[in-house]
Structures are given as C-alpha cells and as structure tokens.
Amino acid sequence: MSSQAISLYKKRRSQYALGKNLPISQNDTTHLIKQAVREAPSAFNAQSSRAVILFGAENQKFWGRAKDELRKIVPADAFAGTEKKIDSFAAGAGTVLFFIDTDVVKGLQEQFALYADNFPIWAEQSNGMAQFAVWTALADADIGASLQHYNPLVDETVREAWGVPASWTLRAQMPFGSNEAAFGEKAYVEDEARFKVFG
Ligand SMILES: Cc1cc2nc3c(=O)[nH]c(=O)nc-3n(C[C@H](O)[C@H](O)[C@H](O)COP(=O)(O)O)c2cc1C
C-alpha cells in the first residue's frame, strides 16, 4: 500500500548543505511554517508552541550571535570546526526558532491541578510535533532543514534581539534553505527490536 504520509516522512531528512535559493517565495514559506505549527496537535489543545521565523539578514544575525556566544565557551583550537558548522546554517535562507510559552503551561497547571506534573512534558511533546510538522511541510516544498539546539546558550541574545516575551522558552532552532547536496543513506533499527504486534 502506498501512503502519501509515509512518502513525505521519508522525504524529510536532515539537510546540512543549505543555500539561499528557496523554491517558493518568502511569504509562502512563512505561510507554510505558520500553518504547520497551527495544525500540529497539543495536549488539551493548549497550543503552547511559538515560533520566530528569521529570513535573510535576520538569519545571519541570529547565527552571528550564536557564534559570538559559542566563542566564549569553545576552546580556541576547536573553534574552527564550530565556526564552519554555524556558517553552514547561516548559508541557508532562514531559521525557525521554536519556543514553548510557559505562561500557557502555568495556566493549565492552575486550572487542572490533577495533571500539573504532566503539562510541561506535554508542552515539550507538542513542541516536538510542531517541529516535525514544520520540517515535513518544508520537505514537501523541497526546502531542506535540520534541527539544532543552541539553547540555552542563545536564549538571552534572542530575547534581546527580537523582543521575545520572557515567558517564551527557546527549545529548538531549524535552519532551512535550498537543498545543496543529496541526502545520504539512512540506517534503520530492525523492526523486531522496535515493534510488538498482538492480535
Ligand atoms: C529531538 C531531536 C533532537 C535533535 N537534535 C539535533 C541536533 O542538535 N543537531 C543536529 O544536527 N541534529 C539533531 N537532530 C537530528 C537527528 O540527528 C536526525 O533526525 C537523525 O539522525 C535522523 O536523520 P534524518 O533527520 O536525516 O532522518 C535531532 C533530532 C531530534 C528528533
């Protein structure tokens, strides 16, 4: 049986060779990302995921600032490798910064005390679903992307540069752009080790 969904999931891969030539307009890319976040499920339909979408010079600014923060902590003799990696993200067309709005989580904890411990976990899971939704939607549009985690190192500089509310906690960064290299083979764990089917 062929499945449109599975074909798309297979098409979503980590792309590190990014370029600036998006196959669709910046507006359409923005619309796609917004829709993906909007349609991703969340516990209690809390919709606690937030996104900042950076294009062009703003994207350069983000990765420049990330580099500045990394320079403070990475040993000088190892920095060339770090710099190369950061430059590969800056070479793309943009980056999506994914956040959780902790005010929403707190509100739910107050409203539904019985599930208080679960809401932060569900917010993380929901954010992961939003990330997957965006990544897959970008892949569908032939836009390459990868998933990065320079938080909490860049949290403060992000807050300062883009006026992000204090309640928004940065959880992931998704640099995206044109696919400038083919994807490598992907290894899979044997089904026997992963699944049990009964009935
Ligand atoms: C929760 C999560 C965290 C990840 N963190 C990183 C990361 O910090 N840096 C990175 O380059 N890739 C990261 N990845 C990407 C994985 O390494 C990648 O998805 C995996 O190796 C499978 O490759 P594929 O994306 O091409 O299918 C992350 C993926 C997930 C789901």
Image (spheres, helix red, strand yellow):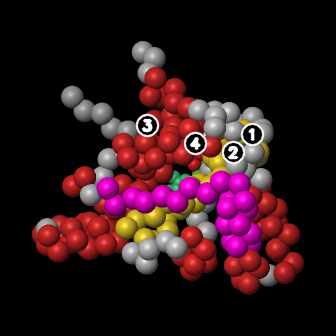
Q: For numbered disc 3, what is the local secondary structure?
A: helix
Q: Is residue 197 above or below residue 162?
A: above
Task: Say whether disc 2 or disc 3 marks the residue closer to the N-terminus.
Answer: 2
Q: Quadrant of residue 103?
A: bottom left
Instruction: Give me the disc on residue 21.
Output: 1
Tell me if label 1 and label 2 are in contact, CB under 8 Å.
Answer: yes
Mark 2 CB near ligand 1 (8 Å cut) = no
Residue, disc 3? 192
The residues bearing labels 3 and 1 have C-alpha atoms spaced at a distance of 42 Å
Instruction: Determine which of the numbered discs, if any, sits on residue 55 in the image.
Output: none
Q: Are marks 1 and 4 in contact (CB under 8 Å)?
A: no
> Which kind of residue does numbered mark 2 sit on?
Gly
Q: How far is the residue under mark 4 from the one under mark 2? A: 14 Å
Residue at which label 2 appears: 177
Asked whether the beta carbons under mark 2 and mark 3 sit within 8 Å of each other, the answer is: no
Q: Earlier in the sequence, mark 3 or mark 1?
A: 1
103 is higher (above) or lower (below) than 22: below
Q: Secondary structure at mark 1?
A: loop
